[in-house]
Amino acid sequence: MKATKIIMMAALALITVACSNDDNDILTPAEQPAKSEGIPFTATISIGESASTRALTENGTTIEATWATGEKVALIYTVGSTTYLKEAEVTPQAGGTATISTTLEGSPADDTDVTIVYPYSAVDESTKDVKTGLLDLQNGLLTGPGSIAENYELRKTTTPAKLKIDGTTASLKGTVTLTNLNAIFKFTLQDLSAAAKSATEFKVSDNSGSVITTVKPGSASDVLYVALPAMGDGTYWFNATIDSKPYIAKANISTATVAGKYYQSTVKMATVGDAILSDGKFATKGTSGQEAVIVYVGTVDKYFNHFLAIALSDAANKVTWSDALTAIGTYAGNHPITIGGTTYNNTNAWTSVYDVVTNDNTATSATATTLHQGWRMPTVTDWRYLYAGIFGKSPTTPIGVNKGLNYSSGSDIFTIQKVVSYDILTGYIVTGAWIYDTWFSSEVTGNDGKAWIIEPFYCIFDCLEKTANFNVVAVFAY
């Protein structure tokens, strides 16, 4: 297809204003050293890609980038112990090239290395290098104020060019082409039923949960343009805030993305109440192959990087605490889930204590020391976030002996009206999970002979001897 050219916004020119001295005394000036006027510099550089592979105006499957008069690039070079940062103005030429011009300071010698960065706004003037965290916050626009065209269409000489000093003028040696350091992605957001969904925030993270970029559009949008660096093969995650609710999706990249390219993707996002399948994909509840229902979306240090889900059936009924741990491993073996090339089953199920909680009414003490992904016996902390996800409440309320709901309305996580909370909770479950008193893996601080349970119908937490008999249900943390 034929691509349509656009003009990218130029960086704002810096304006300096001299200040005057209003004193009336007329003084004899001291001798001043002669001012260095610098070396006039003019050179031709290339934008780096052809119109068929790159652009900032979308036309089907292509985007085209062109130079525009008034744009600025940065020239960075060192003379002695001083590093100079010069702003050079662009004059477009034919065939994707441009002439850049400025005045060099410091009397650089012939063959001095020079790094060229576009746009100038991408450079930190204090460090004289590309800004740290340049992609941290974007607005999801292709063009316009704060957009990719203005801030994130980042190009650079990956190998320094060489200055050519010819008497009183300067240029560059050889052909200099800028390399694009980012790719552009067009993300179209939908829910699992393919209905368009507009986000007020959108994040891209790696598999460990580290955020690569955050997009905050000026107004909610279902189409977001995002600049990202080249990404290696692996699993990546998307989190969005849609209608004030958290949504999540994942993408498996089998072939590394390439900087300077344009990618388009429809992102189907799940939320609390949707299911995760045995192949690690998200789907609406009731889909064949479902293994668990999402009850919380988000990151909790040492508990889960992306989401928490609850099994669709009990792992065991009326067993002691130690037998409950064994039952989790058996359940995991019968209900494997594969994510990012790893299958989570009985070989990696967590079958021991995960956190320890204080035996009082004022505080909790989560002592998980490392993240365990996959199936596990739920913890008191897991239950807190399960409630937070389902009912939209704070997950930080303390839990103590026999501390349950007071069955009145309020903002506290444990003041949800009893019958309503129980009916909603069991609506997430296919069979009997959570209907009866259920074990946690959480032991009691100072008394490892006791562990915590939940009495779902009465919404009461309690700690009892591990030799007692209660049900057990698995959760899947990732």
Image: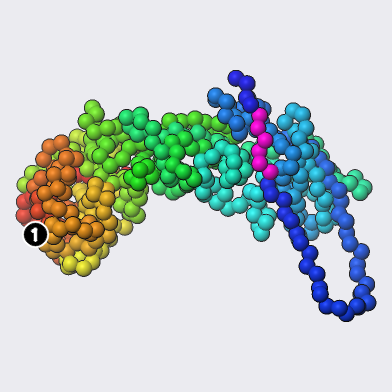
Q: Is residue 183 visible?
A: yes
* Image position, residue 200 (x, y; %): 42, 44
> What residue is drawn where x is 6% and y is 51%?
469
Question: What residue is disc 1 on?
Answer: 465
The quadrant where residue 118 appears? top right
Quadrant including the N terminus: top right
**Is 24 contained in the magenta span?**
no
Residue 9 drawn in magenta: yes
Q: In the figure, 37 relative to 233: above or below? A: below
Magenta-drawn segment: 5-10
Front-lying residue, 245 or 373: 245
Query: Compared with residue 29, is residue 176 higher up or lower down, i.e. above or below?
Result: above
Viewer can see residue 354: no
Residue drawn at (35%, 34%), measured in percent from left and top?
A: 191
- Looking at the image, which residue is at 11% across and 49% down? 419
| Name of the residue lying farthest toward the bottom | 25
As drawn, is 275 to the left or to the right of 148? left
Q: Nearer the viewer, residue 340 or 146?
A: 146
x, y percent for residue 60 = 55, 24
Q: Is residue 311 left or right of residue 155?
A: left
Mark 1 residue type: Glu
User: Residue 21 appears at what percent x and percent y?
Assistant: 81, 73
User: Residue sitting at 37 percent across and 42 percent down?
Assistant: 242
Residue 163 appears left or right of 255: right
Quadrant where the C terminus sits is top left
- Badge 1 element: strand
